[in-house]
Image (spheres, rainbow, N blue to C red):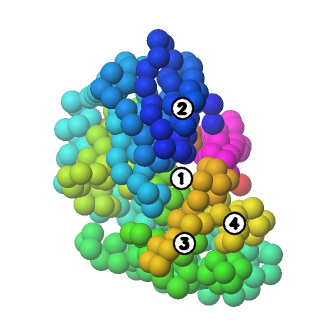
Amino acid sequence: MGSTKYLMSMGELSRKDNSLCFRKNNKNTYIPIENVKEIYCLSEISLNTKLLDFISHNNIVMHFFNYYGGYSGTFYPKEDLVSGRLLVKQVKAYENKRMDIARAIVLGIGENIHEVMYHYYKHDVNEVKELLDWIKTEFKSKLENVQDIKSLMQVEGEVWQRFYSNFKYILPENFIMNKRVKRPPDNPINAMISFGNSMLYSKTVSVIYNTHLDQKISFLHEPSEGRFSLSLDLSEVFKPIITFKTIFELVNRKKIQVSKHFDKNLNYCILNEAGKRIFIEAFEGRLESIFDHPRLKRKISYKTAIKLDCYKLIKNILEEKEFKPFRLKEKI
């Protein structure tokens, strides 16, 4: 986590000479600027334009999260990696190849869910076999036959819903999810999903920032004002691998517990500061974990795999090479 700094508590962030200074409870903590690439503000943080100019000059991306652990927005420096040629081609790809790219993303989601759940099937959780069989047959058949984005997103919604409905077979009872509730999350499992997905989305924003892709032109999700919809697209296939595997391991190893790591109210439930620290450490550890990539013949991390998906998309846009998002079975 050396290149990423997390601010968990309320305080003030400012520039002090050529360092960052975080002031909390009348005490200063100094953060050397060297090697810092991202700052996550997970609580109420005061700052000023002098600081923003400083972090912009040092090419640091800053992400802001709300009280419920949801993503609020990102400040990043003006884009140096700008390609007019790629921008024009990306718009044309949206017009001419949107369904092909979006279909590839949804296929990647399903196949990665299959790989994650197959792990439990191998360990005698036979109840998940129905989901595995559905993904191999009906899911893929539906994908091949859909003709528009709305129908495609319905198939995507179905595979996620079937995935959620199988949590009862692999998680303890107090982490069972009755339904997916986002704003705000209403129980511990929804709280972790919302926080983890927001973390993954913001990581993807940072990765895309360091490419020539335009964040606003997406394929599965509708391009819209007020959000980086391409980051939504490219983070989707990594949710089963990064967000959900992190959650499953933390819960099943009892590192996150309902009684210790959540703040609950009448209509919401969120990770407390201790819970966030545990989650972030596990999330970052998974993101930075490396594996042998058989096609590339070298070791890469999951974070690098996200960047490689960006380059695959660029090759599809510029060179007409088929876009195949990362699949967990690639590491086997």
Kindly identify which residue carries mark 4. 260
> Disc 3 residue type?
Lys
Residue 303 image position (x, y, % from top left): 56, 42
Q: Residue at x 33, y 29 (%)?
A: 48
Which of discs 3 and 1 lies nearer the camera? The answer is 3
Which of pointers 3 and 2 lies earlier in the amino acid sequence? 2
Which of discs 3 and 2 lies nearer the camera? The answer is 2
Determine contact: label 1, label 4, CB under 8 Å. no
Instruction: Say which mark, if any, is on residue 326.
Output: 1
Quarter of the image with the C terminus is: bottom right
Q: Residue at x 65, y 54 (%)?
A: 274
Kindly identify which residue carries mark 2. 26
Residue 295 painted magenta: yes
Instruction: Say which mark, if any, is on residue 264.
Output: 3
Alpha carbons under labels 2 and 4: distance apart: 28 Å
User: Is residue 137 visible in this depiction of the protein?
Assistant: no
Q: Secondary structure at mark 3?
A: strand
Q: Which residues are magenta?
A: 281-302
Residue 13 vertical placement versus 148 (above, below)? above
Q: Secondary structure at mark 1?
A: loop
> Disc 2 residue type?
Asn
Q: Residue at x 33, y 21 (%)?
A: 50
Q: Residues within 10 Å of mark 1 (few under 14, many from 20)?
A: many
Residue 93 painted magenta: no
Residue 244 image position (x, y, % from top left): 60, 64
Horizontal arrangement in the rendering, residue 122 relative to residue 285 (left or right)? right
Viewer-nearest residue: 95 or 322: 95
> Disc 4 residue type?
Lys
Viewer-nearest residue: 120 or 177: 177
Q: Residue at x 54, y 32 (%)?
A: 26
